[in-house]
Amino acid sequence: MAAIPQAVSHVLPLQPFPPYPLPTPSPSRTGARHRRGESFIACSKGLRGSHDDYHATLRALNSKGRTPRKSLGQHYMLNNDINEQLVNAAGVKEGDVVLEIGPGTGSLTNVLIHAGATVLGIEKDPYMASIVTERFAETNRLKVLQEDFVKCHIHSHMSSFLASIVSDMKPRYAKVVSNIPFNISTDVVKQILPMGDIFSEVVLLLQEETAVRLVVSALRTSEYRPINIFVNFYSVPEYKFNVPRTNFFPQPNVDAAVVKFRLKKTADYPPVSSTRSFFSMVNSAFNGKRKMLRKSLQHLCTAVEIEKALEEVGLPATSRPGELTLDDFVKLHNLMVKD
Ligand SMILES: C[S@@+](CC[C@H](N)C(=O)[O-])C[C@H]1O[C@@H](n2cnc3c(N)ncnc32)[C@H](O)[C@@H]1O
């Protein structure tokens, strides 16, 4: 298993919840304009350090009397340094177009906009959608759609959004930079990764365990699953860094981690006649994880034909799914499944 980089430790004091008492900001830390009652966009102009974001997040929640909803995975980022690192990991620069799933109070959105991006936010919670829309009302660099990411047509939303941008620097591809609710991680990965025709880089803040499972899981381990074949088929994944749970409000029970996926273009996908039949074969193979492939794939070919195909790939006749790389599966599929 590849080594996981050293933890980035940012420990912040947390406020009781609810309600969230607003500490009196010190002018030296937050600037003279950062006072209660000011518009949120004005506050955001002074946001640079992690303490400022900490205050801004609590202020935004207080402004609507919101209690974070567990069912929506609402764990807000309190540390601006981590938002900056997410944005840097995606190499966001002036003129970029970025999809942000779940902008919440807009702390990450703020850093994206300051980096020069135009952002499409998809936010399920109508209260948070209105908070973030109000916060950036004075800029034309943000459009928020109040929709459930899992159910929305993200490809057509992003295509229209890219088409609507009038600029000489208009990029061909958008990026994804998001601190996503942990419970929709798999949906996000499954929907976004095959969209290399409109997205180039995808940087996600995920539950640590999910990040490791998606990116670090190695051959011949119990964590190696069809999702690893999927991730490597459509992207080049990279584990970036660990984010301790103390950086979120309210604090989750687990740590998080940042992962980057560089999406492959369609022409660079491994050559299979049909992705549908390829992934169907991979799923069948892993359904009988401990079974040999010559048994679990018998709905496709006879045991003898499977053994012959394995031999042609250079694998033993007794191979199990956890022993095959993406490349092995591609070769096996192309030998066993003819259009
Ligand atoms: C982990 S919070 C992150 C908020 C903010 N980006 C931050 O970094 O502080 C996740 C956000 O995603 C929103 N959300 C939850 N489920 C969603 C879904 N299915 N589609 C879109 N947004 C969702 C939540 O309301 C919340 O604002």
Image (cartoon, rainbow, N blue to C red):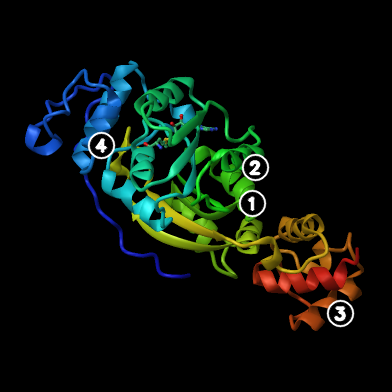
The amino acid beneath tag 3 is Lys
Counting from the top left corner in percent of width and height, residue 326 is at 67, 69
For residue 53, which numbered disc appears in the image? 4
Q: CA distance from mark 1 to mark 3?
A: 35 Å
Q: Nearer the viewer, residue 292 or 99?
A: 99
Picture layout, residue 219 above or below residue 316: above
Name which quarter of the figure residue 148 lies in: top right
Residue at left offset 76%, top offset 69%: 271
Sequence-earlier tag: 1 or 3:
1
Mark 2 burial class by Cα count in 10 Å: few <14, some 14-19, many 20+? some
* Location of mark 2 (residue): 155
Q: CA distance from mark 2 to mark 1?
A: 8 Å
The amino acid beneath tag 2 is His
The amino acid beneath tag 1 is Met
Answer left or right for 57 relative to 319.
Answer: left
**Of labels 2 and 3, the one closer to you:** 2
**Of labels 3 and 4, the one closer to you:** 4
Whether residue 117 can be seen here: yes
Picture layout, residue 16 above or below residue 183: above
Sequence-earlier tag: 2 or 3:
2
User: CB atoms at circles 2 and 4 under 8 Å apart?
Assistant: no
Residue at left offset 65%, top offset 71%: 325
Counting from the top left corner in percent of width and height, residue 22 is at 18, 24
Sequence-earlier tag: 4 or 1:
4
For residue 308, which numbered disc appears in the image? 3
User: CB atoms at circles 2 and 1 under 8 Å apart?
Assistant: yes
Residue at left offset 11%, top offset 30%: 32
Counting from the top left corner in percent of width and height, residue 207 is at 44, 47
Helix, strand or loop under label 2: helix
User: CB atoms at circles 4 and 1 under 8 Å apart?
Assistant: no
Ligand 1: does it lie within 8 Å of the C-beta at label 4? no
For residue 195, which numbered disc appears in the image? 1
